[in-house]
Amino acid sequence: MNYVFILAGFAVLILGGNWLLKAAVSLSMRLEIPKIVIGMTVVSFATSAPELIVSLKSAINGHADIALGNVIGSNIANLGLVLAIVIMIGTIKVERSFYITDWPIMMVASLMLYFFLAFDGEIQRWEGVVLFLMQIIVLVYLFKYQKVAVIDEEPEDDVKYPLRTSLFYLLLGGIGLWAGSELLIKGAVSLAIDFGISKRVIGVTIISIGTSIPELAASIVAISRNEKAISLGNLLGSNVFNVFTVLGITAMVSPIKADDPRLLDYDLIWMLFFALSIFPLVFVLGRMKLSWGEGLVLLGSYLIFITLVM
């Protein structure tokens, strides 16, 4: 039965990703907002909904390691797995504003998480408030000042739907991604428990990969339709959203304490490594792009992480 849940989850996630992309493209055209901003806000919020739900449930039920491991593992998977697969499928050309604005925002979020946890191994309620306020500041900045950071070809099948239709697709896509991830997590966690895997490992690997599947589904659909700005923005925005909003809200509801020290001295370091690595990979040889070569580096690093963490 667990395998049925996993397969059904994948199917629903693909449908949800397609609906969400339709809504995002339509909204960017209707509101004349750069697609990377839509990717970093609307799409990333919807695809990060599973992380928020899983982390809240875990923290409330006293499983802080799963809540924290879920976010750290998801941020690693978004770059080491999802971005790797996306850029191996199609090259993403990047403008200089990418690492003047978008990459630094992701790094600020990653470093804030590191220092909050390094201090006392816990994200307290007031720290959760600070994280959530940072998310609001980021949103205001993106909508007011963000310029196009990815060279995005205009596909011929872009459709500007009526606002009501766009919102319907947005809702449908979000529900699809949430439901698909729930099915996938249910099957994957049940299998992991049967093999006696720890909460930390479940959170950092099984659950984090499961909650990153929406990003993968949305990004693959996006890049297959040449919506590269939405794809890249979705992944960067999801990592920011995971720290500022998911952990921010979760900590405000229930402080998050890392019981397993390896979350701090191992998993968190890997998260910072992947966040930092995007900069040199974009900048290498002055090519200003991410393609299959960089994808292999990221995927290889992710496989090393998974092998060692198990």
Image (cartoon, rainbow, N blue to C red):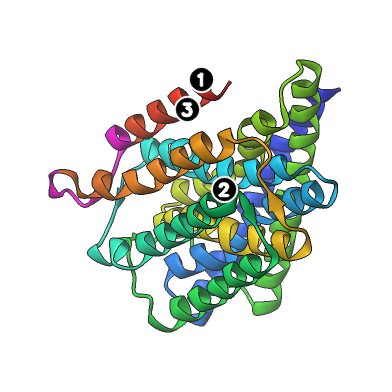
Instruction: Give residue 307's mark.
Output: 1
Rendering quarter of residue 294: top left
Label 2: how many residues lie within 10 Å, few (<14), some (14-19) or many (20+)? many
Q: Is residue 160 visible in this depiction of the protein?
A: no
Q: Is residue 236 above or below residue 252?
A: above
Q: Which residue is mark 2?
A: 215
The magenta stretch spans residue 149 = no
Q: Position of residue 115 (x, y in %)?
A: 48, 56
Q: Sequence-wise, which precedes: disc 2 or disc 1? A: 2
- Extreme residue toward the bottom, this view: 144
What whole-number distance in Å separates the C-alpha atoms at marks 2 and 3?
20 Å
Q: Is residue 279 above or below residue 28?
A: above
Label 1: how many residues lie within 10 Å, few (<14), some (14-19) or many (20+)? few
Q: Amino acid at mark 3?
A: Phe
Q: Residue at x 50, y 81 (%)?
A: 140
Q: Does the residue at mark 1 contact the one at mark 3 (Cβ under 8 Å)?
A: yes
Q: Which residue is mark 3?
A: 305
Q: Is residue 33 above or below residue 84?
A: below
Q: Is residue 12 above or below residue 41?
A: above
Tell me where the magenta segment starts and ends, as one range.
285-294
**Residue 133 vs residue 102: left or right?**
right
